[in-house]
Amino acid sequence: MKAEGRTTPPYLRKRRDIGVGAKPISGAEVILNGTRKLLDDKWTYWQGPRFRSSLPIKWQVVQDPIDGGTCVQTDDPAAAGGLYGAADIVTKRTYRDFRLHIEFWIAKPGGNSGVYLQNRYEIQICDGDRTTHGLGAVINEQPAPYHAYHGLGKWNAYDIVFRAARFVGGKLVEKARTTIYLNGQKAHSDVPISQVWGGADSGVDGGNDGGRGITDTPQGLKLQCEGHDVRYRNAWIKELSLDKTGTDF
C-alpha cells in the first residue's frame, strides 16, 4: 500500500484475520456456520453435573438479524432462569493449544452467555457488565474491555490464542495462558489463568480444589446457555503447538 509516495506504516494497516467477518485462516476448521448440519456434526451437550437437556441439541438455528443467512441461538428450555450447565454445548473434538475466532450477537440488556476455552476457562459474554465478571473478561481474572464492545443488536468477535496448562509428572507447572482481541482491539495480552471459576456446574475441573485442581486433559470448546437470546456464527479454530509460553499474535 502507498500513501503520498510512502509505504503506509504498519500501525495504520487493519488486520483482516481478526474482527467481525474474519475468514478462516489456513488450516483452520470451521466449527459453526449457522447451519443445523454443522451444529449436529461438530457439537454435543456437555453432560456435566447440572445437565438437564437431551439430544438432539435443542438450540435453534435462526435468521441472522443483521446480514441475512442463519446463526445459532442459545435457546434451550432446560436453561430457563439462568441455569448454566443445564444445556451448554461443547465441540465433539478436543483441543490443547489453539487459535479461535467466534462471533456473537446479544439481543437484550443483560444478555448472558460465555465462551469456555477447553471447557474450563470462561471468556465472558454479559451485556452491561464492565467488571472482571463482564463482557470480554477473562472471568474473575482480568476486567472487561467494554470500550471495544459494539453493543446490543450488533455482531461482535473474539479472536483468541490459547495455550493449555502444562504438567510434569501429573503436576501443574505452567498455568494456561491466553491473548484475546475483542472486535479487532487487543483486550488481554498473554494472561495466565489461575483456575476454573463457577464450581462443578461451570466446566471441567470446576469442582476440583475450588477450581484450582486442573487436570492434564484436552477438552472441547464450550458455549454457555443461560436462558438469554445470544447468537453465534462464523466460528473457526486451528490447532497449534505452542512450545514457548507466550500467546501474543
Image (cartoon, rainbow, N blue to C red):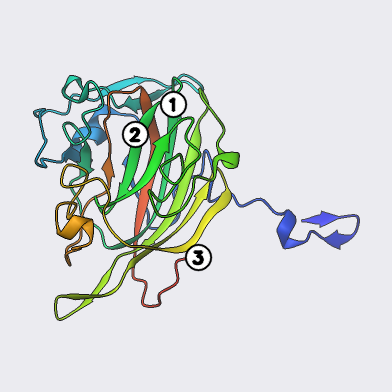
Q: Earlier in the sequence, mark 2 or mark 3?
A: 2
Residue 208 in percent (x, y) is at 14, 58
Identify the disc placed on residue 185.
none
Cβ atoms under marks 1 and 2 closer than 8 Å:
yes
Query: What's the residue at 53%, 49% (across, down)?
Result: 18
Q: Nearer the viewer, residue 67 or 85?
A: 85
- Disc 1/disc 2 C-alpha distance (Å): 9 Å
Residue 47: image quadrant is: top left
Q: Earlier in the sequence, mark 3 or mark 1?
A: 1
Identify the disc placed on residue 113.
2
Q: Earlier in the sequence, mark 1 or mark 2?
A: 1
Q: Is residue 33 visible?
A: no
Residue type marked 2: Ser
Residue designated by label 1: 106
- Disc 3/disc 1 C-alpha distance (Å): 28 Å
Residue type marked 1: Ile
Left or right relative to 10: residue 163 = left
Q: Is residue 13 visible?
A: yes
On screen, 244 above or below 55?
A: below
Residue 77: image quadrant is: top left
Residue 42 in percent (x, y) is at 22, 41
Residue designated by label 3: 248
- Disc 2/disc 3 C-alpha distance (Å): 25 Å
Dot 3: element: loop
Dot 1: element: strand
Residue that protrudes farthest toward the bottom in the picture: 169
Q: Nearer the viewer, residue 212 or 221?
A: 212
